[in-house]
Amino acid sequence: MLWRYQVGKKRLEEVFGLHVIETPNALRGREFLYKNPQARAGDLAWALENPEVRGIIANMGGDDSYRLLPYIDETLIRKNPKVFLGYSDITTMCCCFLQAGVMSYYGPNLLTPVAQPGRLDCYTKEAMEKTLFSGTVIGPVEACPSHTPIEWKNLPEDQIVWRKNTGYRLIQGQGIVRGRLLGGCMGPLQQIMGTRFFPSRAVWERSIIFLDGASPYGSPLAWLHSLRALAAAGVFAGASGLLTGELNAEERKILVQFLRDEVRRSDLPVLANVDFCHRTPMTVLPVGALGEIDCENVSFTILESGVK
């Protein structure tokens, strides 16, 4: 994937005018990084303490960031607040930033979609610019015009198949609700339950939850199990709203029945097909920012700046 990293690095430099430097262990390969979680945590500390570093973007997600938790110092994060961007397994690190009281950003990783084949799409580019490079209120977050699955092969741009987007879909709910954006990918959230880094019930209270990862590995039953695990942790009890990605008919049925019969939240507004999940393009969700779901207009708005 080194070629892909070089593509992403070049795009950050050419599209956003950034000077990109690697952390000491970022390019040491999958086997080394798997065997040395302390080195990965050390890279985060190195970037936080390095005065030349203004922001941090993850190369990719994965499935074992929970192994970094023994080496994370939230005091170091608190004393060195910086932009931290990524999605999927990066959820774990976003929760560490939340524990430290520092905003993080659930959004593009470097290898995808920044280094997607062809070019960086306009939707992802504009979301990154508005959230990370502007001090203005982010405002309405529109649905992308079209989307495509994540593509890891080095295909030419004309071979990428884009599907016209159907827009946001209101699954249930009425009126307008507001809450602090909180969530991430469901697998990593389950992995850190029981640790001090999993948000407490009080933190989930009155939040707008965003959940990435319906039917993991193609299993609707696994989707239900993930929802139940979050329910047992008190995630849904006092929430203001819920954002999800694209749901098929079976997933919608499972979610509605779960909310109605298992957590007694038929009142919870749910907006689906929001562009923060595992596909291209992708918006950026500032964790902790105030969001709004308008059920009557089927819209989603972020009411604060991503950076202040």
Image (cartoon, rainbow, N blue to C red):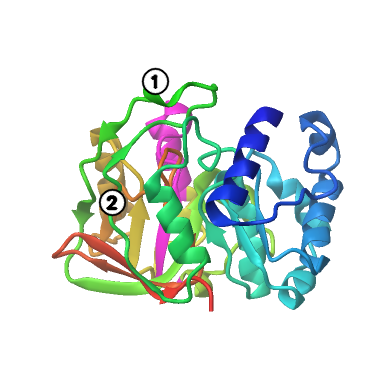
Q: Nearer the N terminus, badge 1 or badge 2?
A: 2
Mark 2 neighbour class, 10 Å CA radius: few under 14, some 14 to 19, many 20 or more: many
Residue at 45 percent across and 47 percent down: it is 212
Q: Quadrant of residue 264?
A: bottom left
Residue at 42 percent across and 38 percent down: it is 279
Q: What amino acid type is highlighted by mark number 2?
A: Ala
Up/down of 252 relative to 105, above or below: above
Does dot 1 land on a helix, a strand or a loop? helix
The residue closer to the viewer here, 229 or 98, is 98
Up/down of 137 relative to 229, above or below: below
Residue to which mark 2 is pinned: 143
Residue to which mark 1 is pinned: 159
193 is within the stretch colored magenta: no
Does dot 2 land on a helix, a strand or a loop? loop
Residue at 38 percent across and 68 percent down: it is 239
Up/down of 142 relative to 40, above or below: below
Residue 267 in percent (x, y) is at: 23, 64
Q: Quadrant of residue 145?
A: top left
Q: Are marks 1 and 2 in contact (CB under 8 Å)?
A: no
Residue 98 in percent (x, y) is at: 61, 68
Number of callouts: 2
Determine the residue located farthest toward the left in the rendered image.
296
- Foreground mark, 1 or 2, reads 1
Give the magenta-colored segment's residue range: 205-228
